[in-house]
Image (tube, rainbow, N blue to C red):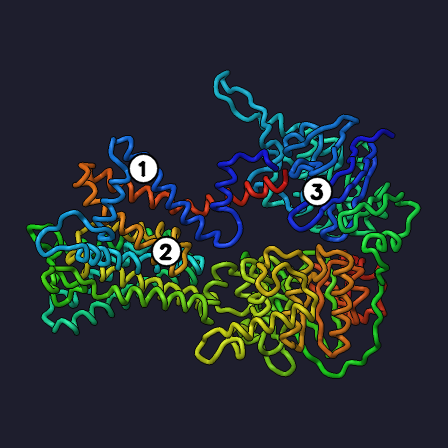
Amino acid sequence: MNTTSLPKRVFILCCGKGKHQLLRTSLFCIFLSLLAGTLLLLILGKNPLEAYKSILQGAGILAKPRYAGRKSQLTDFMSLLNYTTPMIFAALSVAVALKCGIFNICVSGIMVFSGFMATVLFGYSSLNPLLAKILVVFSGILFGALIGVLIGYLKHRFNMNEVVVAIMLNYIISYVVSFFIQTRYIDPITRQSVAVSQNARLTLFNHPVGNLNMEIPLVFPLALIAVFVIKFVLDKTRFGFELKAVGSNNKASKYAGINVGRAVVFTMIISGALAGLAGVSYYLGSNASIQPRVLPSLGFDAIAVALLGNSSAIGSFFASLLVMIFDCGTTYMSSRLQVLREIAALITSILLLFSAIGIFFRTLADRMQREIEEV
Amino acid sequence: MENLVEFRNITKRFPGIVANDDISLSVKKGEILAILGENGAGKSTLMSMLFGMYTPDEGDIYIRGKKESITSPLVANALNIGMVHQHFMLVENQTITENIIMGIEQTKRRFGLFPVVDLEQAHTKVQQLSKLYQLEVNPRDLIEEVPVSTRQRVEILKMLYRDAEILIFDEPTAVLTPQEIESLLKIIKNLRESGKTIILITHKLDEIKKIADRCAILCKGKLVDVLKVADTSVQHMSALMVGRDVSFTVKKQEHTYTERVLLVENISVVSQDNITLVDAVSFAVHKGEVLAIAGVSGNGQVEIADAIAGLIPIKEGRILLEETDITNLSVRKRIEAGIGYIPEDRHSVGLILDFSLKENLCLKQYYEEPYSNKRGILQEQAMVELGKTLIEAFDIRTSKGNDTLVRSMSGGNQQKAIIAREIHLNSKLIMFVQPTRGLDVGAIESIHKRINTLRNEGKAILLVSLELDEVMQLADTILVMYNGKVQTIKKAKDLTKLEVGEYMMGVHVEHN
């Protein structure tokens, strides 16, 4: 029994069976990525503690030593929330689909599509601000859900693999949208689509509050609500029960009388609508224009984020927040410690990498545990 | 005869359970030793230690008189020990030879340079082995194209190719049809005659009686007795195995049938490749009647049950439940109309293994009141109560009650959970497909009693079984299928076991 090495036992303690195994594994992944980041920083000759501190400062979690005029820790924090909002929607979108056994990698494509449609329909109009914003949100939900339905229907009706469909749709959407942007909506200076009007934007930019100018993400509360609604749907409702049943055993669900096709299609409507919300809060929120032929990496990062959050709603929320703290904070870190921005971004990537392999750690720990029990 | 394998005071513990308790057992060279025991008696654990998948907590294993520590299957292989697992480990889209030589391929150099696998030589060797032991396989066939019995032979060949002398069979007949079982038993005998030593894990007493020399009986982790099979009765063995006498016949009351529950009229089912699986089958099941569909596996019996449950579409014909035509109803509508179904495959159809026990017990009712309210919100409390009631009523044994993951439960208890759920639906018709497959004698007995009780309560029962004894014991009416067609339907009392067997093999044909 005592032959097992200490590191092995610590590892099992972290990722092995027992209470909160999922949470412990996620925390272990985060710890590992911090460790890897530390190593990286040490190799570069930087003080890792200082670096992590400045990441937190950059993200508005800790106070910076100095602030520019009309800026403070609060404005940094609001900016963090602004960038986190689309990530929460995107991670939820992936998580909901995963629960139903569907791997939705079309989040990026859906984001571009819904963002573009909302931009074209309402972004350039002169509607009054409130109406415009509401319409933008609803068009995000609608166009996102449309793509979702398409994927769900193809999967259900023709048994087409959703991953293949999603990859194709990503390309189709990206190129078709680029075509229209290039031919009709291009801003000759930025080489992006013409910026949307302030009326339609879901983030109030440089909004004066007291003596501060801050970004106010108007849909952040909506993201919070979405987290709780999804949690409720998954845990407490009839539909959530069906969704999870189909996700864990298709055949048994059919045998139990669950309409599998309906569950798949409805799940994809929800997943698509969430991705659509991510799209509008990204392209008409934290950004104001669309870069042609670029799929937002956020849509793909969301997969790792959802996995880090164990495809649960609450987990996705905290994982989004964490990843975006890194994402937002690294800019400040790179300027303060004279680390290349690319290197700083690498730390975020390491976190995403480690979050995606949590399942592997869990299986490995389970196996080691079995071996130990057998010795 | 010398002792080839000796277990000396083997103890193996798992958390919360002693799987093997101080077991000393020897295996003689050239014998067939059967290891008999209920599910969870510790027979698989004991053999897994011989094959190197577990190592004992206490005690030693001696092979050919020498103490060995078998730490992995590779070590076991080196000691000429081979095991045929219950679930085959084969690559579907490779040939038989490729599967056999995998891991120990011999290579030759093409043009004296490029190493390639020497398939020709391997084919020849496999061919020779297959002839020598009368296994009759074509080494060039793809695994996906050969039947289950051939796949099993491939597994046997795999061991022989690796020069195994001690062959462990883990419930080898569980997946086979009656004729296939016969031929497997013959193969096992052949292997013994050519000098191999065979250990057979099983809980089928008649097989032991047929081929084994000695029988070691395990009960709750302890070795109860080692018996000479020739001098022991089946009843005695089973009594030792379960620790009590098992009644082999269920008492039946006579019935006259008045009300028809299910009427199947000329239904046909075709596969995706348009092969006819069920060909114009008609029958009726009445209140208080057990209609058993007998037949060799794969003759359309399971498809009939699936078609009645609505899981697969029918091409022609119609299905009536009482007076309602259910031919075009959805699965759920049929469940509501009164069809309960215990499917053949517990793991991938009957249960959601990653759901808790209470969720599985509620799997067909979660959507209606009181388990969900009108707005589609689940009512946890109602589910918990249902779970508690059923766990108690059906004696489902679990570690954490309602919240146990079904995956962690034993096969017998999983089956109990399914049966509990289906009976609780209070259906008019209950279909049992292979309800006792892979279960131990105690569980089989309780399921048989359960079926008989339901019959006496006036349920209509459709039983699909490959076990002829089960059919003979439970059925009021027997329908025999062959090649998707009905061979005969007769009152059980008008048929003998032998006759049913002949119908199953397609010897007798009768049009009615």
Q: Quadrant of the N terminus of chain B?
A: top right
Specify whether residue A161 is in view: no
Q: Nearer the viewer, mark 2 or mark 3?
A: 3
Q: Residues within 10 Å of mark 1 (few under 14, many from 20)?
A: some
Quarter of image, res A84:
bottom left
Labels 1 and 3 positioned on one and the same chain: no
Q: Determine the residue positioned at 31% across, 51% down.
A: A322
Labels 2 and 1 positioned on one and the same chain: yes
Disc 2 to disc 3, C-alpha distance: 45 Å
User: Is label 1 in a helix, a strand or a loop?
Assistant: helix
The amino acid marked with disc number 1 is: Thr
Q: Position of residue A66 (x, y in %)?
A: 13, 48
Parent chain of label 3: B
Disc 1 to disc 3, C-alpha distance: 45 Å
Which residue is the extreme one toward the top? B112
User: Of the numbered discs in the image, which one, if any, rests on residue A77?
Assistant: none
Parent chain of label 1: A
Quarter of image, res A102:
bottom left
The amino acid marked with disc number 2 is: Asn
Q: Which residue is label 2 attached to?
A: A104
Quarter of image, res B193:
top right
Q: Are marks 2 and 3 in contact (CB under 8 Å)?
A: no
The amino acid marked with disc number 3 is: Lys
Q: Which residue is label 1 attached to?
A: A38
User: Is label 3 in a helix, a strand or a loop?
Assistant: strand
Q: Which residue is label 3 attached to?
A: B12
Labels 2 and 3 positioned on one and the same chain: no
Parent chain of label 2: A
